[in-house]
Image (tube, rainbow, N blue to C red):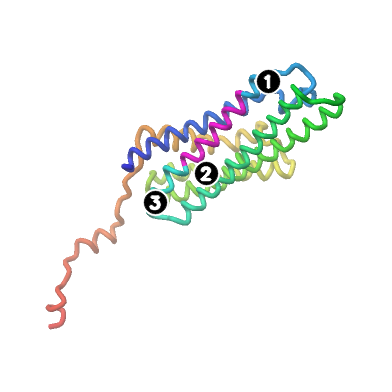
Amino acid sequence: MPTQRAARIVGAVMLLTFLTSIGGYAAYGSILDDPNWVTDAGSVTTVQIGAMLEILLVIANIATAIVLFPILRRTHERLALGWVASRIVESTLIAIGVVSLLAVLTLNTEGVGSDASLVTSAQAFVAAHDATFLLGPGFCVAFGNGLLLGYAMLRSGLLPGRLAMIGLAGGALCLVNATGALFGGWEQMSATGALLSLPEMVWEGGVLGIYLMTKGFTTPQPSPRATVQQSQPTMPLAAAAH
């Protein structure tokens, strides 16, 4: 697959991951915040839409790894492998979170027992989803999609340096957000969390999404030293012997 065609595919799929991740979380609505949702007449359809969007997110994550890995491995195979591994772990955690919320739907439509027991079970599943959201879109995105991929793009020259630095900065701040949420400093989706996640959102949606779709990869320029070495004539061995 030609490199620039691959860049546009990666950009389109990256933009899809950005939109489905936000849309999925938004569609879940009150199931994440209302402990009595499981016993009330909550909107099952919107939760199902959220689950579908996150399933598309998992598929898109895998697609980015498949398309981008052969390009990254040309210059930094270990970084490419590390990013693919983080993508796999992130996708697995997202899938577990989807299963947790689908279990709450089952309790809502088919659950038996007292309301108190249903609420307790539902809260456990929602807590599991929150944990996967912290580990997947929190830590895995910060380390893999931010730091690892940003550094790989910087070293390979596939993106201008100033744009690759957005990935490094976004990953670092996203890691701060996930760490703060883990230790109870603030909520992951609070105003503080949104502010810390903003550069990562610009990186994923703006740079990896829109920029790659419209501009493609940058052709790495050879270093001045390499250019000088290539321009120097090679002395024949026979002449060197004399």
The structure residue drawn at horizontal position 36% and vertical position 32%, both measured from the top left corner, is 214
Classed neighbour count for the residue bearing mark 3: other residues with Cα under 10 Å, few (<14), some (14–19), many (≥20): many
In the image, residue 81 lies at what x, y percent? 49, 53
Magenta stretch, residue numbers: 49-64
Residue 58 counted in the magenta span:
yes
The structure residue drawn at horizontal position 44% and vertical position 38%, both measured from the top left corner, is 208
In the image, residue 135 lies at what x, y percent? 65, 43
- The answer, for residue 73, to whether it is visible in the render is yes
Q: Mark 1 — residue?
A: 44
Q: Which element type, helix, strand or loop, lies under badge 3?
A: helix
The structure residue drawn at horizontal position 65% and vertical position 24%, both measured from the top left corner, is 47
What label does residue 125 carry, if any?
A: none
Q: Mark 2 — residue?
A: 145
Q: Quadrant of residue 102?
A: top right
Q: Mark 3 — residue?
A: 156
Amino acid marked by disc 2: Asn
Q: Is residue 11 left or right of residue 61?
A: left
